[in-house]
């Protein structure tokens, strides 16, 4: 009989001990707007692959994207629907479409990762036996009653995964949600990809040539799309204040059509006479190599992030990380042990942290790298994230089929 993984070292058949007659193969359907390069999308793909490996039927509903082929490779089934749309009419039409899929595939669990499709899925599940759950990936902006209501759908799941304590506290403070239904599951990365030994000299040479990096310079890397809250302007200000001039900064990310902000950054670089020390690079397909080229990695977000992958990727690669002291970074960076946490929007504090990191000798950098890599390997791996997510599915299946096994005790989402 098929089974869903309940514990890291043990797989227990959920259907075998049901008091009713569940299907031999559990079916889990994830819904996400599109399958692009983001962290939520990566988590969706990782979970789908592990569901297939555990003997569970894995469906993913999205509007498509560049990564659909990864689902096919894992054995998961992709179904294309316009679940990316925020148009109320489209959201309403998607209710019947999702309900039809639930009935056709006999779906047990519908797991939604975004607000617009969550409204469709929530109402679609009401007239079926499927359980509805969500993952809240961010502390969504609340600018009024309408926005608060729109966001509230993420708190209505039979289980709600929060990707950080920061997100869990946001849910508890702003929505009527039973704390016992929240599960804290941090995002995780694949260490087979993000590890220093996985990067070859040829990869480093290729990127260095493409970026036209000055030979021998200390490289400060800020990965992140070109949008104001990512704090590029704060790093530009900090660069002007750094006394060590043997530093070159790469702002790595696409402006995604935000031409005005990019032009603002380019103008600031020119006005501060930093044209020879800062470069904006649109895209990189080899992030492990990009991290390995860097002397310091910076995450300068002025708004708190729900989680933030940059700090954990940088630490996994053994790079010194400087992040802003709020949001998810407070849970992923160990202050003064695996990196630095600085005041949001404070270029002076950022400049001081950069200079401190630049003063590390080889032995100190090695100690920091060892601590950082061990920290990530213990707490933020893809395997840990996937196992904990499958445990949540197991809880819901136990409830649905009245399994005799007692569900695990529910932990507090946040102190």
Image (spheres, grey):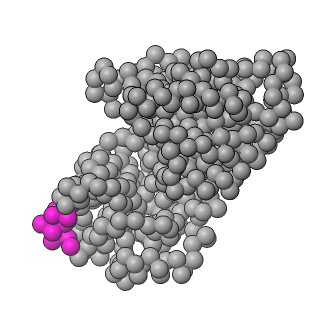
Q: Nearer the viewer, residue 354 or 388?
A: 388
Q: Nearer the viewer, residue 176 or 184?
A: 176
Residue 233, above or below 141: below
Q: Residue at x 52, y 26 (%)?
A: 95
Q: Residue at x 34, y 68 (%)?
A: 281
Residue 400, above or below 48: above
Relative horizontal placement of residue 150, taking residue 102 as reference (left or right): left
Residue 332, above or below 3: below
Residue 139 occupies quadrant: top left
Where residue 359 appears, x then y in whole percent?
37, 68
Q: Residue at x 35, y 65 (%)?
A: 282
Where residue 66 appears, x then y in whole percent?
52, 56
Q: Tell me if residue 10 is in the magenta stretch.
A: no
Furthest-left residue in this view: 271
Quadrant of the drawing holding the N terminus: top right
Q: Nearer the viewer, residue 148 or 85?
A: 85
Q: Nearer the viewer, residue 171 or 326?
A: 171
**Residue 181 seen by the camera:** yes
Q: Which stretch appears magenta?
A: 265-275
Where residue 29 appears, x then y in whole percent?
64, 36
Q: Residue at x 58, y 30 (%)?
A: 98
Where residue 91 appears, x then y in whole percent?
45, 30
Residue 256, above or below 132: below
- Main secondary structure along the magenta-highlighted residues: helix
């Amino acid at each position: 009989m098929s089974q869903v993984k309940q514990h890291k070292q043990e797989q227990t058949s959920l259907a075998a001990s049901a008091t009713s007659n569940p299907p031999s193969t559990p079916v889990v359907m994830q819904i996400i707007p599109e399958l692009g390069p983001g962290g939520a999308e990566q988590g969706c793909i990782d979970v789908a692959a592990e569901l297939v490996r555990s003997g569970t039927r894995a469906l993913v509903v999205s509007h498509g994207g560049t990564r659909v082929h990864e689902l096919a490779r894992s054995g998961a089934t992709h179904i294309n629907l316009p679940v990316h749309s925020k148009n109320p009419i489209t959201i309403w039409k998607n209710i019947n479409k999702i309900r039809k899929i639930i009935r056709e595939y006999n779906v047990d669990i519908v797991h939604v990762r975004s607000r617009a499709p969550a409204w469709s899925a929530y109402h679609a599940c009401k007239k079926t036996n499927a359980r509805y759950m969500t993952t809240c990936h961010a502390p969504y902006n609340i600018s009024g009653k309408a926005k608060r209501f729109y966001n509230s759908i993420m708190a209505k799941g039979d289980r709600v995964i929060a990707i950080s304590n920061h997100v869990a506290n946001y849910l508890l403070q702003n929505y009527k949600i039973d704390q016992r239904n929240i599960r804290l599951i941090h995002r995780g990365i694949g260490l087979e990809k993000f590890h220093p030994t996985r990067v070859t000299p040829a990869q480093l040479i290729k990127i260095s040539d493409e970026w036209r990096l000055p030979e021998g310079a200390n490289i400060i890397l800020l990965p992140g799309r070109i949008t104001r809250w990512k704090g590029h302007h704060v790093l530009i200000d900090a660069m002007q204040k750094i006394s060590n001039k043997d530093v070159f900064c790469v702002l790595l990310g696409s402006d995604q059509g935000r031409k005005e902000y990019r032009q603002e950054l380019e103008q600031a670089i020119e006005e501060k006479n930093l044209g020879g020390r800062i470069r904006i690079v649109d895209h990189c397909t080899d992030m492990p190599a990009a991290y390995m080229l860097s002397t310091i990695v910076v995450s300068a977000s002025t708004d708190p992030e729900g989680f933030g992958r940059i700090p954990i990727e940088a630490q996994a690669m053994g790079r010194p990380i400087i992040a802003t002291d709020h949001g998810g970074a407070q849970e992923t960076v160990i202050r003064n042990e695996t990196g630095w946490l600085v005041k949001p929007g404070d270029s002076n504090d950022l400049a001081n942290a950069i200079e401190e990191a630049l003063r590390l000798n080889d032995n100190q950098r090695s100690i920091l790298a060892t601590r950082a890599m061990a920290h990530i390997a213990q707490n933020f791996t893809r395997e840990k994230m996937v196992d904990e997510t499958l445990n949540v599915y197991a809880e819901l299946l136990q409830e649905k089929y009245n399994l005799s096994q007692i569900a695990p005790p529910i932990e507090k989402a946040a102190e």
